[in-house]
Amino acid sequence: MNIYERALRVWGINAQLGMVIEECAELIKVINKHWRGKATKEELIEECVDVDLMIAQMKEYFKDDINTWDKIKMQKIEHLEELLCLNHQ
């Protein structure tokens, strides 16, 4: 059992969904502080890592739907590619 699965088993999905919200809120807060020159690059990285860890737990939770996850991710990447192409014309 990997660490993300263990976290989901110990705290449950509802608690971890709450943590996703909390970590995203903390990332938003530090981004705003960073824009004002009141947060360091390291603080920004730390909050990004916290969100990344929660996303990894969500990916574990949705592992039975990993094909859907990957399909949606590819669609988003393709859309990003289209935006980048439009931006460079």
Image (cartoon, rainbow, N blue to C red):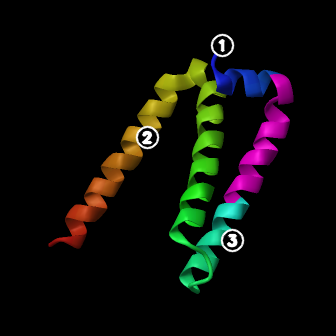
Q: Quadrant of residue 54?
A: top right
Horizontal side of residue 75 vs 40, given as left or right:
left
Q: Nearer the viewer, mark 2 or mark 1?
A: 1
Q: Which residue is mark 2?
A: 73
The three-letter amino acid code for the residue at tag 2 is Lys
CA gap between label 3 and label 2 equals 26 Å
User: Which numbered disc flags the more N-terminal residue, 3 or 1?
Assistant: 1
Q: Residue furthest bottom?
A: 36
Magenta residues, as a range? 10-24
Question: Which residue is located at x 41 percent, y 48 percent?
Answer: 76
> Quadrant location of the N terminus?
top right
Check disc 3: other Cα within 10 Å, few if <14, some if 14-19, many if 20+.
Answer: some
CA gap between label 3 and label 1 equals 33 Å
Q: Are marks 2 and 1 in contact (CB under 8 Å)?
A: no
Q: Which residue is mark 1?
A: 1
The three-letter amino acid code for the residue at tag 1 is Met
Secondary element type, mark 2: helix
User: Which numbered disc flags the more N-terminal residue, 2 or 1?
Assistant: 1
